[in-house]
Image (cartoon, helix red, strand yellow):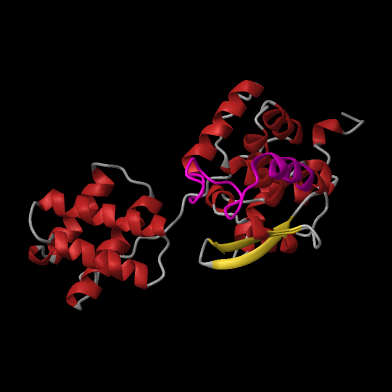
Amino acid sequence: MKNQLIEIRKEFALSGFSEKTQAAYSACLRQFQEYYKTGLENISKEQIKDYLYYLIDKRHLSVSSLKQYYYSIRYFYLKMHGKDMMEGFPEVKGRTMKLPQALARDEVKDIINSLSNIKHKTMLITTYSGGLRVSETAHLLVSDIDSKRMMIRVSQGKGKKDRYTLLSNANLKYLRIYYKQYRPKYWLFSGYDRTKPISTRTIERVFDVAKQKAGIIKDVGIHSLRHSFATHLIESGIDVHYVQKFLGHSSIKTTAIYLHLTHSKLFNIQNPIDFPEL
């Protein structure tokens, strides 16, 4: 069974799945196999159905988590055994819509200003002002900063897509200060070993410490900087289609979620209770 898990991991990689998806699908298959304590080739369709019901009835998984198990198991049997073991099963449908949480502009400023370490401060500024995912910040190259065009090149972002996003004047200012002090050669933000990029966990810890220092009590992580970037652009009147390009979203529907976070003044909306006659 161990060899089959190794082989299916190769199939995930060859199919272009991200490392995160590969890890998630592999974990689902390991748990599935451990549940029955036998090789997956010995498990019947009825047992698969029972397992999926167990995930719903006993573990109370969300729809998105349940889908990971559903598709990883289905993909395994299709690739490794050439048969669809989920044929005739009801497809897992539905999606819980959970709005992202954005920070106010002053909160972002307070978080960034709480840091004295220029490298840490520059990492957070770059993440916010470019609307980057933490993994994208970690894997930026020195050559990705295009100061002539005031753009940041994001190589192989989510979905293996390249894109360009904004390079702000403030970001460039701090990048130059940071560069003079640290002299990065290849990776813009390297780890202790300068031949390797900084870890995403390190950047996340920097954000958590800065948030605590700034006295921000919202239950948010570093991804809130990306959410805030999108929200603040829309509040500034930037067309949502431009925001979509900066974020690297394939569908405008994904970007449109941020319309739920924008301040009502953007649309000149007046609450009924504020009418003079009331």
Q: Is 112 above or below relative to 234?
A: above
Q: Is 23 above or below relative to 6?
A: above
Q: Is 162 above or below relative to 30?
A: below
Q: Position of residue 87 (x, y in %)?
A: 24, 73
Magenta stretch: dominant SS? loop
Q: Is residue 62 rendered to the left or right of residue 270? A: left
263 or 130: nearer the eye? 130
Q: Quadrant of the N terminus?
A: bottom left
Q: Is residue 100 rendered to the left or right of residue 240? A: left
Q: Is residue 261 visible?
A: no
The residue lying furthest to the right in this view is 276
Q: Is 150 included in the stretch rendered in magenta?
A: no
Q: Position of residue 68 (x, y in %)?
A: 34, 57
191 or 211: nearer the eye? 191
Q: Position of residue 53 (x, y in %)?
A: 23, 52
Residue 89 occupies quadrant: bottom left
Q: Is residue 20 rendered to the left or right of residue 250? A: left
> Residue drawn 34% across and 54% down?
24
Q: Quadrant of the C terminus?
A: top right
> Residue drawn 72% across and 28% down?
113
Residue 60 occupies quadrant: top left
102 or 148: nearer the eye? 148
Q: Is residue 11 visible?
A: yes
Q: Is 197 included in the stretch rendered in magenta?
A: yes
Q: Position of residue 243 (x, y in %)?
A: 71, 58
The boundaries of the magenta stretch are 172-199
Tell how many labels.
0
